[in-house]
Amino acid sequence: MTFLHWAILFPFLFAFMVPFLYKTFRKIHTGWFVLPLPICLFIFFLQFLPGVKYKEGIVQTVKWIPSLGIDFAVYVDGLSLLFALLITGIGSLVVLYSIYYLSKEKEQLNAFYVYLLMFMGAMLGVVLTDNTIVLYTFWEITSFSSFLLIGYWHYRERSRYGALKSMLITVFGGLSMLGGFILLYIMTGTFSIRETIAQSSSIADNGLFIPALILLLLGAFTKSAQFPFYIWLPDAMEAPTPVSAYLHSATMVKAGIYLVARFTPVFAGSAEWFWIVSLFGIFTLFWGSFHAVKQTDLKAMLAFSTVSQLGMIMSLLGVGSAALLFDHFEFYSVAILAAIFHLINHATFKGSLFMVAGIVDHETGTRDIRKLGGLMSLMPITFTIGLIGAFSMAGLPPFNGFLSKEMFFTGMIRVLNMDVFQTETWGFLLPVLAWIGSIFTFIYSMIFVFKTFAGKLQLENLPKKPHEAPIGMLIPPIVLASLVVIFGFFPNLLAYSLIEPAMKSVMPSLLKDGEHFHIHISHWHGFTAEFWMTVGVVILGIFLYLTASKWKRVYDLQPKRMTLNQLYDHSLKTAGKTSNRLTSFYMTGFIRDYLVYIFAFMIMAVGATMIIKQSISFAADDAAPVGIYELILSIVMIAGSITAVLARSRLTAIIALSSVGYSLALFFVLFRAPDLALTQLVIETVSTALFLLAFYFLPELQKKDKTRRFRLVNFIISAGVGGIVTLLAISASSERTGKTIAEYFLETSYSLGGGYNVVNVILVDFRGFDTLFEITVLAIAALAVYSMIRLRTGGKDVEENGFKNE
Amino acid sequence: MNNNIIILPIIIPMITAVLLIFFNKQEKVQKYLSAVSSVINIGISVFLVHYVHTNGIISLEVGDWKAPFGIVLVADMYAILLVLTANIIVFACLLFSYKIVDYNRSKFFYYSGVMFLLTGVSGAFLTGDLFNLFVFYEVMLMSSYFLIVHGNSKPQLRETIKYILVNVISSALFVISVAFLYAVTGTLNMADLSLRVAELGSSGIIAAISIMYLIVFGLKGAIFPLFFWMPGSYQAPPAAVTALFGALLTKVGVYSITRVFTLIFLQDIAFTHTFIAWLAVLTIIFGVIGAISFSDIKQIVIYNILTGVGVILFGVSTMTESGLEGSVYYMIHDMIIKGLLFLLVGIVFSITGTTNLDKFSGLIKKYPTLGWMFFIAALALAGIPPLSGFIGKLKIVQGGFEQGEFVLAFAVLLSSLLVLYSVMKIFINGFWGEEKIPQVLETSQVKSLYVPAAFLLALSLFYGLGTEFISSYIKQAEQVLLSPDLYIEAVLKE
């Protein structure tokens, strides 16, 4: 176990201590104890920076289930380090922020920090492990900690709703992804991602390649809230704002991005990967930004914005995957560069914007932009942070968002030059949707900052009197906003420290040893297409922002009943209702129905088998001749059985039944088995007497039973069961084997068992073990009957009417 | 070493049960005796697991009558692992019962009934003789009749009659199936049956008889479409009994299907095992449909038994190394987790006096431990790693994929989602939300019920995280299932 493993496990271990710390030091906000951990981990991960720049990644393996090929292997390369720094860095800021956001008097802080730490550890695990099964394990833990955090205020109905929704969708994706991992394992024989990558060329033609690709992408798309799975993310905003900033914008939702980036070396080069990832991404960008504009809740707007921005990164990864096909790959790999750069930028500006939204909510008591406005003068620092974040998000210079947005346009335009996978026909969609999406992004960024901070102050609509937030709450967004500015002015700080190593992990095959991607990020490239696109975005964006009231009716065009949310709600409700109806339909509570199902299945299954497999045979060679006695006895038995069924009084039925039993005994006599005949006679006599005794106490058969109707189903079923069993018996008897173990019993009954009566010897000696337990059965039956008669509990410990199975 | 030790897991509970009859009025003796016997049994089972691990399959010819003529008991790794698990479940249920079963019930032989049940279950796992299997089924069933009606409340009486009727019919079918198979093969010893059925080659009558066995064991194991008796009968008795039933009874059916379809009926895998695969997936589907349709927490867990049964059988039906290995993993997990869930349901019932989810909510504030135990158990049930259900499901799905059953295997995988939904509904609506608890039992009284549940939960956690420690045992169990020769050789040596 190396320190790297401990770095992943520390948050979990610490999570165990949190409840004790919470209980012991009630006076101190628990967050202060938690804060040092992400900071230390951040510093710890910083020291890997020089390492990943020049060398191959670092691998450390701890055996977990080696016999199944599942090892806790940790792998640090550019990509995982980038994520690890994001997780711990943003994590530190979020913990600090939460200390001021969550009141130590009112909130269950212990639970909050346990979930948060679990998430942090799991997320580190996702990005640092090399084993797909371990990755999946951590992946699900992030889903569940997210579930718990969304449901943190679980007495609110919306929180529970959002928690369940996010869990169902992300776990669905997780399971699909697991399916993909299993398929990869079947193809490659390994759960290790690096070994899978090494074999990537040999599996591309495998029939399982495309299913694996699709299943894996289902995991990535659900987690990263891509269309149509994004619907959980807006509802996840029920979580406390620090959680939204951390999980639902900066880290967890990027796990899908990570997965796509991580598996790019395996799947890149196939048309399916290129198109699915690019198109879903670019459409999500458009869809998310389009819907963000109509939101009135600040956090909902940011949620849709996150959806949209994730789509943008996703589409870049899709487009960039085509670089593998070209010799002049650097021309196309700019999309990957843009993806990684924007990933960082998004974390900084969106994190700060969420914190701004949280501050506004915290200080005014509302997040509704219809009630907000004019906060600029009251909260100048918050306003400045918001302005920086929003302008960066809108893609305005000189902030970092501008740089990555330009690069995004570059990547999309270059699709037009590609001439692979039929990009000549459909490739134009990418830059067009990118441009439209960016216009909407511009609009909602403006709405976010100006509807909140500019305009008229409506004090009467605010639940609280607003003032600037405490300094502790401002520090984290200030740090992030500063990064927005710093990365904007000096983007090349990141170029070779973080971005280039991460690019290398995404496209390892493009470079030879010691080679590097050339990265130079600059503000000004001349009057290029990208420049004009940005100008267009700004002009059209301002125009549409100012005329928003005129065209907002567009949103009503999509009928309310057709939305994806409706689909989700409806299918959940229908699933519950339909399944309830179905289950209640067949679970009638009547044993006669159940027996009909069971027997019908038996008739069909055994009957079909006998027909398909031609099981029916009839051989009468060694059958004994049928004499007059046998004939008479058979007729008596048949008559008795029919009478028993048709009898109108119990007495007749019992007597008819016993006549069948006595005839059977006579058969034993005929076949020279007097001991069996005696046994049968005794049993028959006793049971007839008991029947008569018991039935004496029962009420008369009711009238309606006397006029018995002919029931076709019952007739078919009983005839079928009888027929099947008879056929089986005849066929089995026809294929009797000559060599049975019975020979041994006959031979040794006296010599070894000491008795001439073979049946007796079998019962008490050869198979005495059976007899012992048959006697036990009788004993248990006696106990059961005795306690059934004597014990009266009144059913205190059983619910009388608790279930619908009536 | 003398192989007589194999008989101890059967005989000890039986003798204990008989002794307990005589001490029926001394509650303390009842508790101590059953506890001591249970612990001894666990010890012996552990030893047997270890012994089989080092020495391979052992068998005992009862009364020294040579196989295949007499009855043999066979301890292969699968059987003995299940015996161990069954004993652990019984121990946990006993601990639970000590707190919750009143004097009246214990006076009327409750603990004897539990021990008799264990006798039957262990015997069914260990026997190597088809008719003897029938006898142990009877022991097990008679004890279950005893336990299900014990208490004589109205729902118990009503459900018992259905339960008995179905099982009497299935016992009758069992006997005639034994007779038919004996007629065709002339033997009852399972190893010998395996040889003789193989000699017959592709035989129509054997195919038909094998389907009869599938029905007989499927009735006990509650597979589709034979499970209808189960939801009602398992609802009726108190929690500790339902926990025993849910963890043990259906599993004996599943074990028997596994045994005969990996040892005896192998001549037409393309037909029989594909049929089982479809039934397994249908069982899963009906299980999840039932589970999401109820708002009664006991019913939800009961329908999840179906899903578990389906998953295990699907693994068996693949007849691949991974599929069988997965089914062994999943079987043991499922026994533990079903026992655990029913105990937790029992605790909730003793707090709230109801199992109806509409009648209570917000338990987590007063009972956080219970809430989190339930949460983890729910995740384990759904097969979320690193908990106990994961590895089994992984291997089973892998086996399905390897066999080319992509749709069915993916259905098995996705069933986890609905399983999760069905139990998370309990967590979200019962433990979360505004506090609404109809009838509060003293909290201190409830806490003593946590012990057995926590014990099973710890076991489940260990099973998941410490998979490596058990993997070689599971592997050994799987090898016997995959290569019947190992079993045959051990039984018919010399």
Image: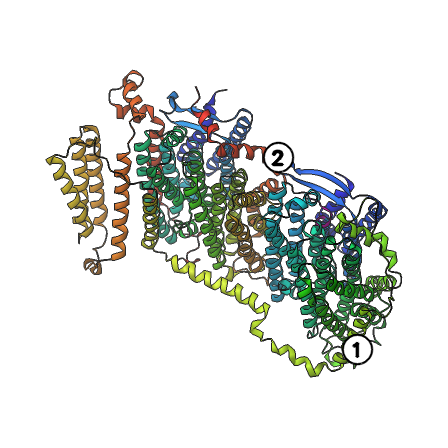
**Which quadrant: the C terminus of chain B?**
top left
Q: Is residue A474 magenta?
A: no
User: Disc 1 or disc 2, which is closer to the eye?
Assistant: 1
Whether residue B483 is visible: yes
The answer to whether A552 is drawn above or below residue A32 in the figure is below
Residue A51 image position (x, y, % from top left): 84, 45
- Mark 1 sits on what residue? A539
Residue A736 image position (x, y, % from top left): 28, 32
**What amino acid type should be assigned to the residue bearing mark 1?**
Ile
- The lab-note entry on whether marks 1 and 2 share a chain reads no
**What amino acid type should be assigned to the residue bearing mark 2?**
Phe
Secondary structure of the residue carrying numbered label 2: helix
> Dot 2: within a 10 Å radius of its alpha carbon, few (fewer than 14), some, or many (20 or more) residues?
some
- Mark 2 sits on what residue? B469
- Left or right of B247, for residue A716: left
Q: Chain of mark 1?
A: A
> Dot 1: within a 10 Å radius of its alpha carbon, few (fewer than 14), some, or many (20 or more) residues?
some
The answer to whether A329 is drawn above or below residue B6 in the figure is below
Residue B93 image position (x, y, % from top left): 50, 42
- Left or right of A640, for residue A436: right
Residue A796 image position (x, y, % from top left): 44, 52
Segment colored magenta: A125-130
- Residue at 74%, 81% in the rendered image: A460
